[in-house]
Image (cartoon, rainbow, N blue to C red):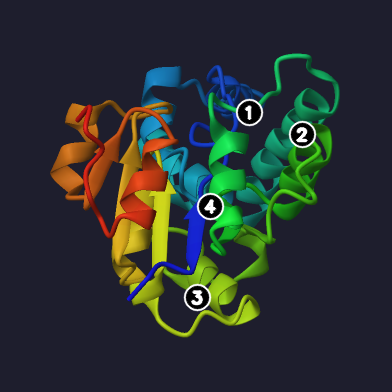
Amino acid sequence: MPIELVVFDMAGTTVRDKNYVAIAFQQAMQAHGYHVAVEQVNPIMGYEKPLAIRMMLRDLETETEKITADLVSAIHSEFVSKMISFYSTANEIEPLPDVEHTFRILRDNGIKIALNTGFSRNIADVIIRRLGWEDKIDLLVASDQVSSGRPAADMINKIMLDLQVDSPDRVAKVGDTEVDINEGINAKCKYVVGITTGAFTRAELEPYHPTHIVDNISDVIQIVLLNGTEPDSK
């Protein structure tokens, strides 16, 4: 079946990150007395952020009764505030190389473009507005718009429903973390493409068994349009 829809992650996949997401997460944790290295944060950045906070607290807090919904909510609110401030004002926010070219080529070939993210919708909307992507994509779905964020398939399932794509055999998922890959696998996407522009290296992506690993997002064009063919340079 030909691909009708490509679902791209945001930070680290289509949007240049410079690790500010992990730094903001670190700072939000520190504001509530939990000290964590950025290197510990990077592997969980693809998850829905309240879940990522809870995961980190399980590693840091010996008194588990302190890990309450109120604490998670307070840390998440701190994180959201930092991210909205950053994405609203920072000059550094920009697409990763060849992203807009890739969107254009895919859409010119009749393929729908969706973004999904572990961010809440209020953060994601700021990013889309700053980049001027409102007319460059067909849909955005954030983790707080569904019952379960990554690695559950809920966001991809919602995108398929909203864009009237009836089979995951017509869907490709592209992301830079293991949770992106597991999301695509759980959604039974035809292609699950790991990309090395974000949090994970090629060696770190390989154990999760994506169908492809690429170093430049434009390689997705060949995979999608030529029925899974690997780019010549890989």
Three-letter amino acid code of the residue under disc 1: Pro
Task: Tell me if 105 is positioned left or right of 209 in this view.
Answer: right
Q: Is residue 3 above or below residue 198?
A: below
Tell me whether circle 1 and circle 4 mark residues in contact (CB < 8 Å): no
Q: Residues within 10 Å of mark 1 (few under 14, many from 20)?
A: some
The residue identified by callout 4 is: 106
- The dot on residue 95 is 1
Tell me whether circle 2 and circle 1 mark residues in contact (CB < 8 Å): yes
- Please state, as top left, top right, bottom left or bottom right, where the C terminus lies in the image: top left
Q: Is residue 51 above or below residue 75?
A: below
Mark 2 lies on a secondary structure that is: helix
Mark 3 lies on a secondary structure that is: helix
Circle nearer the N terminus (3, 2): 2
Circle nearer the N terminus (3, 4): 4
The residue identified by callout 2 is: 131
The residue identified by callout 3 is: 157
Q: Is residue 116 above or below residue 166?
A: above
Mark whose residue sits in front, 3 or 1 = 1
Three-letter amino acid code of the residue under disc 2: Leu
Front residue of this view, candidates 111 and 175: 111
Distance Cα–Cα, label 2 vs label 1: 7 Å
Q: Residues within 10 Å of mark 3 (few under 14, many from 20)?
A: some
Three-letter amino acid code of the residue under disc 3: Asn
